[in-house]
Amino acid sequence: MKHLFVLSLLLVAPLAAAKGPAARFEPYTFQARDGRTTEAELGTFSVPVRHGHPKGPRLTLRFVRFPATGKARAAAPIVYLAGGPGGSGIDAASGPRYELFLALRELGDVIALDQRGTGQSEPERKGLERAWSVPWEEPMDEARLTMALRQALAEAAPAWAAAGVDVGAFNTEESVEDLESLRQALGVPRLRLWGISYGTHLGIAYLKRHAARVERAVLAGIEGPDDTWKSPAQAEALLARWEVRLQARGQPDLRARLGRVLEALKTTPRRVPLRDPRTGTEKVWMASAFDIQCVAFELMRGPEGFPRFVELLGALEAGSFEVMAPLVPELRGGTFSMMSMAMDAASGMSPARRARIAREASTALLGGAVNAGAPEAAWVAGVEDLGEAFRAPVRARTPVLLISGTLDGRTPVDNAEALRSGLPRSVHLVLEGAGHDGLFQGDPRILERLRAFFRGDRLRDERLQVPDVSKPRPPPK
């Protein structure tokens, strides 16, 4: 019996809360975007810029803690991991997910974390953003966009260095250790993770390194270890699903119609006089096939936006390219944050995925537009690719609830299914008709499943039909 007792101590000891600097808390009145408020706590803790150099420079990270209600105060905290990369967890809690954060308090503390370089955490984004542009009067393709982004990144590097920013320290492995530092700062043995989109990429990386510290995890809109660059074939499959839905509404031949518009522009880009909606000045936009491909992929994010593209397609077929005026400024210019570019560049892609994407892009209707603006490590001074060990499949016996939407143009159902062999205790909730932004809201049954899973109830694979938010509209006149 004595030996068994000693063994039990050895098994439990690794799950005891590791020592580390405690988080500091202050009372905080949290306000949602709609004006509602709730009493919470603003927490801060400190992490090394490089966890491999704990005595080097440090960053202050911040989070909001929504305290648990009732008997749930002793439960493992639920930590929300925002998407992006670059999204603020605190800001996400103030929007449409506000009620979800409050509802989950019955199961434990709920923490909205601002990851390094986001929201209220250091370094502040202000001053670390950079503009890029492609002249309106030039036809744009993948190579021209790449050249514009690489030039902007090259120009940004000296400014970031002058600001004292270690750009190479912004990668998912460092954020994994930030999350582990948060656990230590909270003084808890385990966390429950709640992530979406890039937040699942971070959550999976944390599981790979610290599975024993995760009680359970909800991951919605899966970006697996090697999913940072999107698959043109998956986008093609989504177009096919949309074609079936539109056929039932009396709108046939989506892909053939889009193909004809793209082929015409590949042969002859179209010169379109437009008024810049930002400045009111008259300009000429040289409309290219790549422009239209980029718009199509952006509006395929979910059913809230794709009907708009169908409207635009009808106007383009009729030769009315002026309807694109509100979209051209974003197509041909914008800003990027240091954090988001560095994080994605470091995650990279495996040689096998690179070859697959190139093969698929050569025949897919949207081609390389599904990865328009995706950065490579070689483009960002100081950033190193995290390598194949980082992108290897996850293997953990942690209970995981995977959530996917069948109309999600960013993180398709297949991404989640690809993880299942390495997560033997996972279950998959597939939301029929949900897009990337509808994986937590839009149907009260989603919250029911979240509550049940975080309570420890045993769930099964399930498909739920969610309300259809893609309402057909009359064609533009």
Image: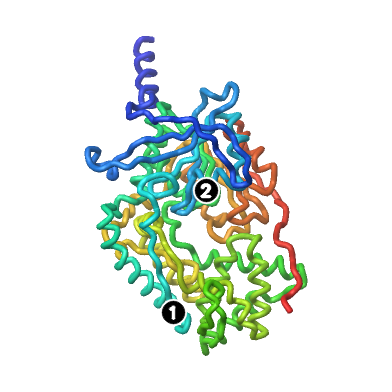
Q: Quadrant of the C terminus?
A: bottom right
Label 2: state its secondary structure. Answer: strand
Disc 2 versus disc 1: nearer the observer: 1
Work out how far the residue at label 2 is from the one at label 1, CA to CA, in angstroms: 34 Å
Left or right: where 110 falls relative to 53: right
- Give the residue at x 50% y 84%: 286
User: Which residue matches tag 1?
Assistant: 135
Residue that numbered label 2 is attached to: 196
Going 34% across and 56% down the picture, which residue do you hit? 346
Vertical placement of residue 73 versus 345, above or below: above
Going by the numbered disc 2, the residue's amino acid type is Ile
Q: What is the x, y in percent for residue 239?
A: 61, 68
Location of residue 441 with respect to 348 vertically, above or below: above
Position above or below: 232 against 161: below
Q: Is residue 155 visible?
A: yes
Find numbered disc 1 in the image and state the secondary structure of the residue it sits on.
loop
Contact flag, marks 2 and 1 (Cβ < 8 Å):
no
Give the image location of residue 339, x and y in percent. Answer: 38, 54
Nearest to the observer: residue 473 or residue 254: 473
Query: Can you say whether 458 is above or below 411 in the image?
Result: above
Please state if 325 lies on the left or on the right of 207 as rendered.
right
Residue furthest to the bottom in view is 268
Is disc 2 surrounded by few (<14), some (14 to 19) or many (20+) residues within 10 Å? many
Point out residue 47 in the picture as x, y percentages from the top left corner: 32, 39
Mark sitting earlier along the chain (2/1): 1
Residue found at x 67% / y 80%: 315
